Image: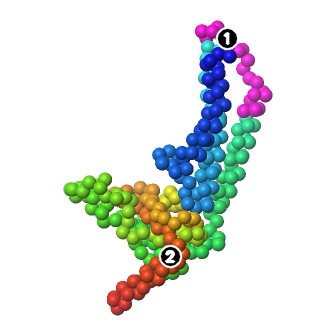
Amino acid sequence: MTLIKKLITTYIITAPLLALASEVENVNDNKWGLNLSKGVTPFSQDIYDLHMIVLFIVTIIGVGVFGAMFYAMYAFRKSKGAQAEAWHENHVVEAIWTVIPLFILVGIAVPATEALIKMEDVSGSEMTVKVTGYQWMWQYDYVDSGVSMYSKIAESSNFARQRGSGVDPSSVENYLLDVDQMVVLPVDTKIRFLTTAADVIHAWWVPALGWKRDAIPGFINESWAKIEKTGIYRGQCAELCGKDHGFMPIVIKVVEKNEFNRWVALQLENTDTREFAKN
């Protein structure tokens, strides 16, 4: 066996294993942004696992197809006097390359369908948050507690983006990704989100949750999340909704349940105070 053939054989055997090892070692933190994020919800984990399975399958197929193609181009090149075969069809080969992809597609379809069904199952939700998109901000209504608030882009980013502000955007922390009021949510709680809009179509998207929901005037779309880690998670409007579409960030702060209850009590106290002052 020539050196070229040995190299090709080694590549065909080891490339999928190297690709998988690279994913395990480097992509967990997704530091280069080259892979799908794992997220912080059970559903986002399911999507990530399905993504990695499909990626592994197509990697094996790609390496096999291109490896065979490059080998054929080298081993049966014209300069070596190779002559094309005269046959036009092979029923066994055609059956194989029809049946195998069929099984692969069915095998992928089953977990994909399970994930889609799980995505729509909002039963057993412990609380409900209504999200309403406006040009160009978000309104959040905590249906169970009565808390309601608006969330707009942070003033620091809003000022820096203006022409003639004199502020270097790179000097602003979380430029265009910060808000004046964060959405506070409890950890390990199944939360139902009701997404709609008051004017034009928006889209509420936080990558860490593993899904995106269109906010359509006159319609309410349901979705859910059970966030398993405390922290701050950022998102944006993902539907072109007008001139300030790029200035509708979303920031979720996930806290322990007792801290969330204290936050709700404080919000209700402040609301009551404001209503009392109006009267």
The residue sitting at 37% across, 90% down in the picture is 276
| Whole-percent x, y for residue 5 in the image | 64, 20
- Relative to 182, 21 lies left or right: right
Q: Residue at x 49, y 60 (%)?
A: 206
Is 181 drawn above or below residue 14 in the view shown? below
Report the span colored magenta: 78-97
Residue 257 seen in this snapshot: yes
Identity of the amino acid at label 2? Answer: Phe
Whether the magenta-drawn stretch holds residue 44 is answered as: no
Q: Residue furthest front?
A: 25
Judged left or right of residue 182, residue 95 is: right
Task: Identify the residue under disc 2.
Answer: 260
233 vs 58: above or below: below
Amino acid at the residue labelled 1:
Gln
Q: 160 and 32: which one is in front?
A: 32
User: Residue 170's spot in the image, x, y percent?
Assistant: 31, 53
Q: Position of residue 118 (x, y in %)?
A: 65, 61
Mark 1 vs 2, N-terminal side? 1
Q: Secondary structure at mark 1?
A: loop
94 falls in the magenta region: yes
Percent coordinates x, y for residue 18 in the rendering? 60, 37
Q: Residue furthest right?
A: 92
- Give the residue number, with chain letter if any, for mark 1: 83
Q: CA distance from mark 1 to mark 2?
A: 75 Å
Disc 2 element = helix
Which of pointers 1 and 2 indicates the residue nearer the eye? 2
Asked if residue 196 can be seen in this view, the reply is no
